[in-house]
Amino acid sequence: MNLIRYWRRIDSTLLLTVLGLGIISLLIISSATHANIGHTGQYDFLMKQGIFLAGGIVIAGVSLYFDYRKLLRFVPALFVINLVMLLVVKFAGASALGAQRWIQIGPFTLQPSEFAKLIMIICLAKLLSGNMNKVGYRTWKSLIPVAAMMFIPTLLIFIQPDLGTSLVFAAITFGMLYICGLNMKLVRHALIALVVVFPLIWFFVLHSYQKMRILVLFNPSVDPYGSGYHVIQSKISIGSGGFLGQGLFEGTQSQLNFLPENHTDFIFSVIGEELGFIGAVFVLFLYFLLLYRALMISRSSGDAFGSLLACGIFSMWLFQIFINIGMTLGIMPVTGIPLPFMSYGGSALLMNLLCVGLLMNIYLRRKKLMFD
């Protein structure tokens, strides 16, 4: 095999965009965490994220040598593995911040719900690919197999509780169904039904903290020292950055620990504070390139399975970027959804880099290639 010819065919724009996001992430995580009071290692977060970034890039690169279409034969096994991991979390997982979402492995924690996103994209792509170029999904009956596949994993994640990831599953499903010819009348009917049953969801499904997050969306002052504190401090952080920002390691809200979760859920607030409007716009531009390339790879794929895989990844990233940045600006409820490639977290970073490897794999094989 001619390796030079092989690597010349990869999507260089996607690769450079991801590397750019990864480098900015390391800088911001270092800035957000180096002054953490009481932490044993000043740069522990930076080192762990760097290890996952380097390891994820290597794994994504190695994955290019394997044809993504071979995943079709492993879909049943992947689905079972996914359920087993989620069940292990339920009965033997580690808890933090009021949720049980992690499995402890030595000094590292694994979050199966992150990998569940990619696994369900693969499983759903196989299910939908057989009907992609046919009549589409125009009746409720046609959606039963999709609902049956997504129900148990979504339920297991919802009861962790992890409403944010459950919503990501919904966004992935909608995006992939949309390119398969989903009848939008069904979507309108579903939204109407949701409005009708929302009182039941409010009183019997949502936890008290989830209700408060929705109320805080409309008025952060309703709980300024509780659920509203994150949003209030986030707005102050972004607003104080101005046009050019206060500079790396110089943001007052972040460095003085006024901004909670400044290296995870609210890392975009640190970007706004320390890099200013210019830095925030540059990061948004990188996300635009990331989404654009994912969409173009979906459109150029030579088979339905590859197109659906890329569409599922695009839908996942678009939803997470919109919700995460929206919550830092106070226009979306706080859900704990991480910002792709930016928020601290090894599981999320590895999963997203695997997605990058899968996208490049699809791009590389968009035509029938002959390797030497």
Image (cartoon, rainbow, N blue to C red):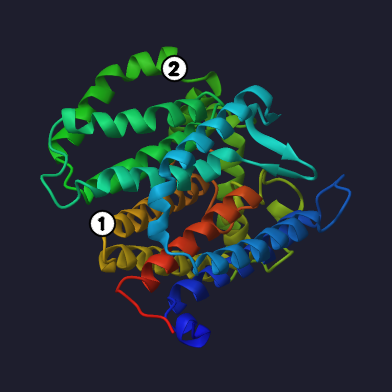
46 relative position to 115: left or right: right
Tell me the residue at 43%/12% (across/down): 204
Observer-nearest of 97 and 47: 47
Of the numbered discs in the image, which one, if any, rests on residue 205? 2
Q: Is residue 266 above or below residue 183?
A: below
Instruction: Classify 10 Å Cα crowding around label 2: few (below 14), some (14-19), many (20 and above).
Output: few
Q: Quadrant of residue 290?
A: bottom left
Relative image position of residue 65 (x, y in whole percent): 50, 69
Question: Residue at the left extreme?
Answer: 135
Q: Identify the residue under disc 1.
A: 304
Q: How many marks?
A: 2
Tell me the residue at 51%/32% (across/down): 83
Observer-nearest of 249 and 371: 371
Q: Are marks 2 and 1 in contact (CB under 8 Å)?
A: no
Relative image position of residue 257 (x, y in whole percent): 74, 47
Q: Is residue 200 above or below residue 87?
A: above
Observer-nearest of 321 and 176: 176
Relative image position of residue 114 (x, y in whole percent): 54, 44
Tell me the residue at 45%/61% (across/down): 358
102 relative position to 133: left or right: right
SS for dot 2 = loop
Of the numbered discs in the image, which one, if any, rests on residue 340? none
Q: Quadrant of the C terminus?
A: bottom left
**Residue type at the position of mark 1:** Ala
SS for dot 1 = helix
Tell me the residue at 65%/31% (across/down): 225
Visible residue check, residue 140? no
Q: Earlier in the sequence, mark 2 or mark 1?
A: 2
**Residue type at the position of mark 2:** Val
